[in-house]
Amino acid sequence: DLLPFLPLSPSSRHDSADDCLACPGGMHSGEGSAACVACEAGTFLSDAASVDASVACSVCEAGKHSEAGSDECVDCVAGTFLADSGTSASLHDSAEDCLVCDAGKYAGAAGSIGCFDCSSGKFLAGGSGSKTYGQVGDGARVRLRVRQDGSVSG
């Protein structure tokens, strides 16, 4: 025999620890919370259910940034760097925190924490929008423009 359908009373949703839901990544809650709270920009939390609320969200490491509510940090793009080693969320809360390398320096990989010097006989001028590269060979300077789309002109 089938039992008649009885709607759940509000109290039946609060009668077991299994009724408590885990916060999704990028969010956390303290003991006894009625809702999850998003991690602030510049921080992340991959698995809120496995951490103590006093630890909560972690600041992104060097070379990375995040938006609010993130479950992971994102690498700064190649050509930029972010040297702060996770001391302050406000230094990791936007892609704009990733700084373009100075003239004569480059960051060849995403997630860079610093820039490397151009080797002897090569240069990299500063500027915005496009970059000017060059190499000295046989006493002549060769200037190449690398546009933001990656194409090169001489």
Image: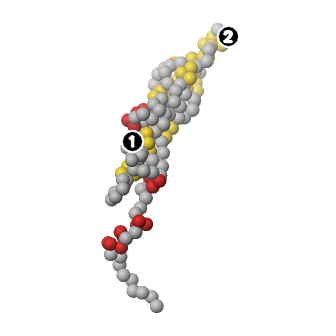
Q: Which residue is found at the position 54% from the left and 35% from the top?
A: 110
Residue 147 x/y as whole percent: 53, 28
Question: How far, Cα to Cα, is label 2 from label 1?
Answer: 51 Å
Q: Tell me if residue 131 comes above or below residue 86 in the rendering.
A: above
Q: Quadrant of residue 97?
A: top left
Q: Position of residue 135 (x, y in %)?
A: 61, 16
Category of crowding for the residue at label 1, using alpha-carbon neighbours closer than 10 angstroms: few (below 14), some (14–19), many (at least 20): many
Q: Is residue 134 visible?
A: no
For mark 1, give the secondary structure. Answer: loop
> Which residue is labeled 1 in the image?
41
Q: Residue furthest bottom?
A: 1
Q: Which element is circle 2 on?
A: loop
Q: Please tell me whether residue 12 is drawn above or below residue 135 in the rendered image.
A: below
| Coloration mode | secondary structure
Q: Which residue is mark 2?
A: 138
Q: Which residue appears at 57% of the width and 32% of the height?
A: 109
Labels 2, 1: front one? 1
Q: Amino acid at mark 2?
A: Asp
Query: Vertically, is 22 above or below 125?
Result: below
Task: Give how far across and how far down residue 124 sits, in percent.
Answer: 54, 19
Q: How far across and how far down the image is residue 71, in percent?
A: 46, 48
Q: Is residue 27 left or right of residue 11?
A: right
Q: Nearer the viewer, residue 131 or 35?
A: 35
Please say if the residues under marks 2 and 1 sit with CB atoms less than 8 Å apart: no
